[in-house]
Image (tube, rainbow, N blue to C red):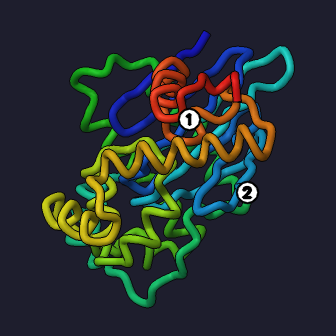
Amino acid sequence: MVEKKVLSKIVYSCYFNVSREGEQFVPEHIFSYQLAGLLRINVNNKEYIFKEGDFRFSRRNQLAKFTKQPPEGGEFKSISVRLDQETLRELSREYGYSAGKRQGDEPIIELKTDPLYKSYMDSVLPYLKLPQEQNEHLLSLKVREAVMILLRTNPMLNDILFDFAEPGKIDLEEFMLKNFHFNVSLNRFAYMSGRSLATFKRDFEKIFHLSPSRWLLQKRLQEAYYQIKKQGKKPTDIYLELGFEDLSHFSFAFKNAFGLAPTKI
């Protein structure tokens, strides 16, 4: 059983007795608190592990894979506050905040425990009981409060929070070879590579001599074949990891490409 309550800017996740694997594009900065269970996040082939009581800050514009593991006989619980660009721009205009020196590229920052964090997250819990409608103003105030607390406890976050630059144009071949296993739209790939969708498709075909959709399918299937044949992995263990939405779709595409079901390799 999985329950997830979303109040636009505040997300409460609760997973009952299951390990939840998935992936996502992180479009906004996120301030999170791990209430219970274990969270594993993989970004750029680096794994981050967060346990009960941990706080974290996730930078925007990241591709991440995650596993949510409830404690034995318990529930996975977390609270995440989305620090949206609109709110950050408003604060920048009101208080004159602006980014200075670029603060590295670490996608996820583990925050040292601070009483202000715990007090803030405890104050967020009652908001989860409010109806979604007609509470946007209250939720916006809580987001502003979160930003102020983060600036108070970690001044260096100023240069991350108020950096409104969009992704610049990067090496497309290197980017796609690193991220082909993420099941995100072509629009996302284009945005993260610093291109419009039309430019992305044009540049892509110049490099790979295939359409993005066709190349992605072939690349994922080739990697699947390698992992099953050479590394002895099971299809059920890799299809999500390689960007397929479900096992039946993966099995059909695999058999269509190689003439055998993945379980027969």
Mark nearer the viewer, 1 or 2 = 1
Answer few, some or many: residues within 10 Å of disc 2's Cα (few below 14, many 20 plus, some between 14 and 19). Answer: few
Q: In which quarter of the image is the C terminus?
A: top right
Residue 22 is labelled as: 1
Expressed as whole percent of the image width and height from the top left, the position of residue 147 reads 43, 59
Asked where in the image residue 113 lies, by quadrant, the reply is: bottom right
On the rendered image, what quadrant is the N terminus found in?
top right
Name the image quarter holding residue 90: bottom left
Residue farthest right in this picture: 72
- What residue lies at 47% left-to-right and 53% top-to-bottom? 180
Q: Which of 143 and 85 is in front in this view?
A: 85
Q: Is residue 7 above or below residue 110?
A: above
Q: Is disc 1 surrounded by few (<14), some (14 to 19) or many (20+) residues within 10 Å?
A: some
| Residue at the extreme bottom | 101
Is residue 136 shown above or below 160?
A: above
Secondary element at tag 1: strand
Where does the image place residue 119, in percent across and percent down from the top left?
62, 44
Counting every numbered tag in the picture gives 2
For residue 12, above or below residue 181: above
Separation of residues labelled 1 and 2 (CA atoms): 27 Å
Confirm whether residue 94 shows in the render. Answer: no
At x 80%, y 38%, the residue is 232
Residue 5 location in percent, x, y?
Answer: 46, 22
Q: Which residue reaches farthest left?
A: 198
Seen at 46% across and 72% down, the residue is 174
- Looking at numbered disc 1 in the image, what kind of residue is underneath it? Gly
| Residue position marked by numbered label 2 in the rendering | 113
Q: Which of marks 1 and 2 is nearer the N terminus?
A: 1
Q: Nearer the viewer, residue 171 or 114?
A: 171
The residue at the far front in this view is 259
- Name the amino acid, label 2: Thr
